[in-house]
Image (cartoon, coloured by chain):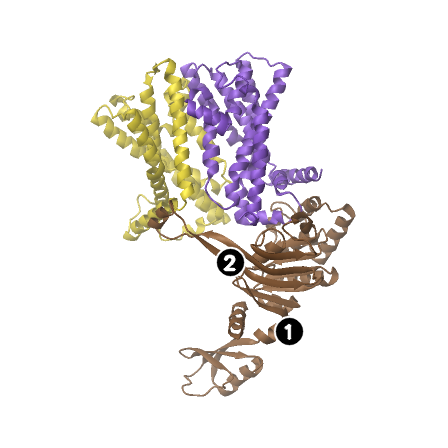
Chain colours: A yellow, B purple, C brown
Amino acid sequence: MRVFSGHKSQSTTILFFILFKLSFIKAFQYRGYILVTLFSALLDVFVRISLWTALFRANPVVQNTTFHDMINYMALTGLLMLVQMSGVDDRLANRILQGSIATDLIRPYSLKLFIFAQTIGDNLAHFLLFVFPVYTGVLVLFGMRFPPTLLHGLVFVATVINGAVISFLYYYIIGMLPFWLESNWYVRFVNYAMFTLFAGAFVPIWFYPDFLIQISYYLPFRYITYEAVTFYLGRTGLPAMPAVLLRQWVWIGILLGLEVALWKAGQKKLTVYGG
Amino acid sequence: MHYFRLYLQFIKIRLTSIVSYRGSFFAGVIAQFLSYGAGFFATWLLVKAFHELNGWTPYEVLLLYGMNLFSYALAAFFFFNLAVDIENLVISGRLDGILVKPVNPFLYLICNGFNVAYFSHISLAVFTMIICFRGLGISLTPIMLVMLALSILGAALIHAAALVMTSVPAIWMLRARFSDILYWGMREFINYPLSIYNRAVQVILTFILPYGFISFYPAQLFLGKEDYLFHPSLPYATLPVGLGLFFVAYRFWRYGIDRYQGTGT
Amino acid sequence: MSYINVENVVKEFKVVRREKGLINALKSLFHREYDIVTAVDHISFTIDKGELVGYIGPNGAGKSTTIKMLSGILVPTAGRITVDGVIPHQNRKENARRIGVVFGQRSSLEWDLPMEETFDLFQKIYRIDDRMYKRNVEFYVELFAMQSFLKRPVRQLSLGQKMRAEIAVALLHDPEILYLDEPTIGLDVVAKNHIRQFIKRINSEKKITLMLTTHDMDDIEQICDRIIMIDQGKLLYDGFLQNFKEKYGGEYTITVDFAYAEEGREVDPRLQLVSIEGQRKVYVAHRSVIETTEALRYFIDNFDVSHLNIREADIEDVVRNAYVKG
């Protein structure tokens, strides 16, 4: 069942691409859906640009941040949606709630890889159709920033990859909760709260009071995209690099351990109580 | 009277159902509280960091959130099921089950949609509004309180009209998700003062999709704001706008059902 | 004028054409094509008060669409329907008070609650007065033997129990007509038999006019007095069960596994060979020509047979037959 360590046969790779293609095609199925989603993405960006414009009207620099910083922060955080693995949780949770998890366990492929492929497929379709055009549009219009040095850029890439792994593991763990819960529809509300307060999804954490920032260090959320974006924008200096990478790895370790333990417990519950 | 009895019966049924899913129910209430609470808190902190948003202080901006949520929750309490769930009703065939009963489907769906979960939204919204008025040192006179109640009623009707209207394509099995643009997308706008947007958006949100009347215009009244747009009488217009819009929405919904039955084509 | 009149009724639906593949999906962003599907195609029939009519046909024949038009949910594209002098869709609520409808594939019961709650709800919906309500609840709980599961949440009931409950709920307001859309679908043999007995009793004891759609031949043989058969929206047969059986029924298939290859041996010409697969041969015969018992005896007496299987015609066979015979 282990994905990242298991042997990868050719058939698994093929399966991966089939799933990937399927979720891609699915996204194109509905004309109305595409137009509407694109339009709402544009509206959303428009509201936020208006908001930041109004906020910076009185003071061009607030907490060492300019309007231009914020536009780049917003666009970059938006573009990194590509590595946000939300959707993993629902896919796994639905299998557990509907009981199909039992058959997944006897199939000759890795469930984790399966879910990963579906999620990446959906993400990429969503990214290419909506996220990329909207945010590159914003960056072209307002001016795109580049990392201050090449090394900042490399650290950005490394932290993004780590962040993707953290995100995947986090959502995978959340997706396992239905082993013990009767439903999980409310989990996304909790996620929204967490990402708003501790991941800088909407307002960068640096605008928050100190106590919230302190808490955020003890939660995995800021290590998904926030740290990467601050490197890119040059807000975090290179001396902080080892500490940030180390923290990301520690979180990967913690989440991986938790994932293994929960998976074992869940499987036991499944086999002992029959789900 | 008939529908009132029916409504009481559904309330009984829903409350009994909740008992069998207690755990999820309370988890859901807490989770939704957290989610909206976090959004409110983040906005308040943001405006606080900048001291003001186009002349609106943090509490004043938060009041927009509170009024928006309160009126939304009121509308959703009665109309969410009817509007958002209609697609499921059509696909699963449950709409047919309603149409073979001697009832007005609109009223029946309102009764059937009783959902206690919105009490958590409403209590959070009231809590937020109290915090705002206290934080701003405003004590509302009885007349102002009545005005507030009427404004919120009007705002709820605007929300309801939008929910109802945008659900009509779903009755026809068009998965256009117009509701996503016209409703969920546009709702973002009214969490901030209308005055931060450019003129075109202000015109749209006042005269075409009059969401401005949900929070911005009535809030001007209670906060004594004078950044009037278009005309200083607009802060009083929420209730009439809501009533008018809701009437149109109801007619459109009935037309939707007629076309579903095959009279319109 | 009869109780239920259906004159030249047509129902068309407009359906979006959806093609496979990414290119077509992209194309459909800008241009889409529609197909007109005719679900019901110039159908006419009448039903008298107290009749028990089986409305039959294969899946997708247009049975449910007809029921939906009769009950006022759908409006005919052309033609005219009256039920007791009333046009159902124009007087939907008035019509609804005198009909009961059960859709076999979906539920009108409250999933998480015991049956009793749904009974109460239907009392409020149909404004049934307390005396009538009490009388009917007692009557149907007794008739459908529901006492044992009245207090259990609906989600825990078996399919057969749920169907009994659905029918009871549809009858609480003393409708004059009951439409049953696939009432036995998905049920096991025992449960099907129960439902059939109940349906017959409702018709005979309560004098309720009953129309049921089905594609189960046993339903048809065991309960219906009269058959209306449709396929692809067109009426194929309307008449008594007895004539129906004589005209279309009676066909059966015998599959014979011969112990030895019986090359060259002549088989009774009344048995028509339709396929050969090694030592297995399949024959079709008709009861009016040769009875099943005689056919079976014929094979056993004259051949060395290792296995015999006999299958009665199902609805698909009957419909195919109807086309052949016109």
Q: Tell me the residue at 25%/29% (across/down).
A: A155
The answer to whether A15 appears left or right of C53 in the picture is left
Q: Amino acid at mark 1?
A: Gln
Q: Please state which of residues B231 and A18 is positioned toward the viewer in this rendering.
A: B231
Farthest-out residue, right: C131
Q: Residue B256's x, y, as percent?
A: 55, 43
Q: Which mark is residue C188?
A: none
Relative to A84, is B10 on the left or the right? right
Residue for point 44% across, 88% down = C265
Q: Secondary structure at mark 2?
A: strand
Q: Which of the 4 image quadrants contains residue B6?
A: top right
Residue at label 2?
C38
Q: How many marks?
A: 2
Residue A52 lies in what quarter of the image?
A: top left
Q: Disc 1 sits on a residue from what chain? A: C
Q: Badge 2, how many Cα within 10 Å: few under 14, some, many 20+?
A: some
What amino acid type should be assigned to the residue bearing mark 2? Thr
Residue in the picture at 40% in, 25% down: A48
Q: CA distance from mark 1 to mark 2?
A: 31 Å
Q: Which mark is residue C242?
A: 1
Residue A120: percent from the left, percent from the top?
34, 42
Residue B234, position as x, y percentages in the image: 54, 20
Mark 1 nearby-residue class (10 Å; few <14, some 14–19, many ≥20): few
